[in-house]
Amino acid sequence: MDRRQTIKLIGGGVVLAASALGGFATTRTPHDALAPWQKAGDYEDIRLFALSYAVLVPNPHNRQPWLAELIGDDELNIYRDLSKNLPATDPFERQLTIGMGGFLEAINIAARHRGYETETTLFPHKTEAHIATIKLSPRADMRPETDLLNAFHARRSCKEPFSENPLSVAHIKALSEFGEVFTDTDNVAHLKKLSWDAFKVEYATHHTLKESVDLMRFGKQQINATPDGIDIGGPMMEALILTGIITPEAMLDPNSSAYRQGLDIYDAMLNNTPAYILLKTSGNNRAHQIEAGRNWLRLNLMTTQLGVSLHPVSQALQEYEEMKPLYQEIHQSYAAGGETIQMFGRLGYGPRVPQSPRWAVEEKLI
């Protein structure tokens, strides 16, 4: 950053010297909350080894709702922490269950890398909390998925505007293995409008916006202390927090500059998207949702390998009353065969973005 420049912070009229902001920036990284990314794979016990990758998977609102119990020498019980529910935006826990599917798939990929197969029993006690029992057994002929495992550390959900460059033919073909990819002008325009309209519904509906704001972690100290939820960090954001421009109250106030800036950021992001992908299932029971989560993780790891950016924009798939018209529209338009659209994602070529905060494996053990 040019030290002769100054930066005017959004909406507040506050001007900081770039030299001061440069020094400030060097202290703003929440290293404690990012440590699990570096520790992935640093465990001898095969179960902890696999869990160290599983805690890095994408999940709704970054709630990280998983818990694990070590049983004997070779078994795991996996639970969903019901205290992490999202009653406003995910009233039937469909999205949270999809997140648990990604968690289970990460265990499979990591275990295969070390020569273990996983025998998974879903919902063994027919409860919402007990997701699975997993038995891990060594197998001499196990073929590891090394490329997928290596993609974990670089995997991101890119919440930034994408370039105008269209997806390459090769990338479209590879990603179509996981879902229906749309790159034509009419469908891209329709899906772009759906994603933007759905975001505006969630943003303008007080109880759904408040659910997000209540889960925001403002600045390095809060992020390190509670590394689940939505991190509001980085030097620029922390400067805005320190000056009082960004506060929970301001994020909820439609008349505040912080609220309006949130709209502008998402407008620029959602409306700079060259392609979309929809993941559908034939039904919508818990097994279908788990399978969608497995598929979404593998898609995210594949996009990472290919250098393609992926960002879930599934607001139109949420099942609360205010979203009902858009939920019906996207299903009538793109799931005419009676399928359920489980995930809706943006595809394109975007910038490299930071890792999301994570709880350590040790914090998720029962």
Image (spheres, grey):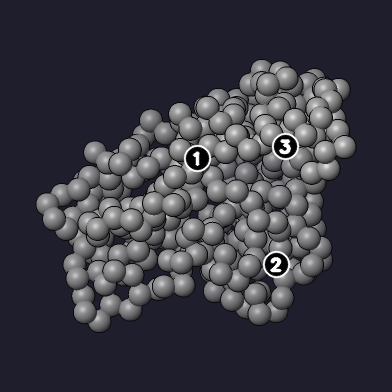
Tell me the element at label 2: strand
- Of 247 and 121, nearer the camera is 247
Q: Is residue 283 visible?
A: no
Of tags 3 and 1, the one toward the viewer is 3
- Of 172 and 232, nearer the camera is 232
Residue wearing tag 1: 31
Confirm or deny contact between disc 3 and disc 1 (CB under 8 A). no
Query: Which amino acid, mark 1?
Result: His
Tell me the element at label 1: helix
**Which residue is pictured at 35% across the width and 52% down the height?**
52
Q: Which badge, 3 or 1, comes first in the chain's sequence?
A: 3
Instruction: Identify the image quadrant of residue 149.
Output: bottom left
Residue wearing tag 3: 22
Horizontal side, residue 231 vs residue 136: left or right: right
Indicate the quadrant containing the C terminus: top left, top right, bottom left or bottom right: top left
Of tags 3 and 2, the one toward the viewer is 3
Residue 115, labelled with which disc? none
Where residue 85 appears, as percent x and y from the top left, is 43, 34
Where residue 190 appears, as percent x and y from the top left, is 77, 56
Separation of marks 3 and 2 at Cα, in angstroms: 41 Å
Q: Mark 3: few, some, or many residues within 10 Å (few <14, many ≥20)?
A: some
Instruction: Identify the image quadrant of residue 111.
Output: bottom left
Q: Mark 1: few, some, or many residues within 10 Å (few <14, many ≥20)?
A: few
Separation of marks 1 and 2 at Cα, in angstroms: 38 Å
Query: Which amino acid, mark 2?
Result: Phe
Separation of marks 3 and 1 at Cα, in angstroms: 18 Å
**Which residue is pictured at 60% across the width and 34% down the height?**
27
Residue wearing tag 2: 182
**Which residue is pictured at 22% across the width and 52% down the height?**
76
